[in-house]
Image (spheres, rainbow, N blue to C red):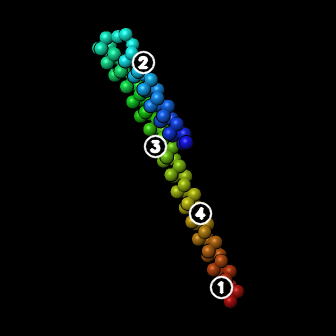
Amino acid sequence: MSKGKVALGAVIGAAAGLVAGILTAPKSGKETRADIKEKAGEVKAKATAKATQAKTKATEVKEDVEAKAKDLKLRTERAVEGAKKGFNSKK
């Protein structure tokens, strides 16, 4: 199981536990709704921060892979040119 799926499961489980705890607490409906709204805002902020981190990391990985692919392409082209020169010089 990937780390992302485990993290998502943990977040969902924590949110479900939080909601269950709030709904079973001996508070008025107005207080309960205010608590849910506050906690939902906190969860949304955390999720947004994690999404931003994931997007940043994905961009970094993409740029790294592109740079390595470009380098490999250049090295391959040089090797092919060298092989052509070596082959032509034997004629």
Q: How far is mark 2 from mark 4, CA to CA? A: 55 Å
* Residues under numbered marks 2 and 3 in contact, where contact means CB atoms less than 8 Å apart: no
Q: Nearer the viewer, mark 1 or mark 2?
A: 2
Q: Which of marks 1 and 3 is in front?
A: 3
User: In this view, which residue lies farthest toward the right?
Assistant: 90
Rendered residue at 30%/14% (across/down): 29
* Residues under numbered marks 1 and 2 in contact, where contact means CB atoms less than 8 Å apart: no
Rendered residue at 31%/18% (across/down): 33
* Residues under numbered marks 1 and 4 in contact, where contact means CB atoms less than 8 Å apart: no
Q: Is 14 placed above or below 33 here?
A: below
Quick one: SS at disc 4? helix
Q: Is 15 placed above or below 64 here?
A: above
The quadrant in which residue 37 appears is: top left
Q: Where's residue 25, x and y in %?
A: 39, 13
Nearest the eye: 59 or 21: 21
Quick one: SS at disc 3? helix
**Label whose residue precedes the other's in the sequence (1 or 4):** 4
Q: Where's residue 83, x and y in %?
A: 65, 77
Identify residue type, mark 1: Asn
Q: Mark 4 points at which residue?
A: 72
Q: How far is mark 3 from mark 4, CA to CA? A: 26 Å
Q: Is 18 placed above or below 62 here?
A: above
Q: Nearer the viewer, mark 2 or mark 4?
A: 2
Q: In this view, does 29 lie to the left or right of 75?
A: left
Q: Mark 3 points at which residue?
A: 55
Q: Residues within 10 Å of mark 4 (few under 14, many from 20)?
A: few
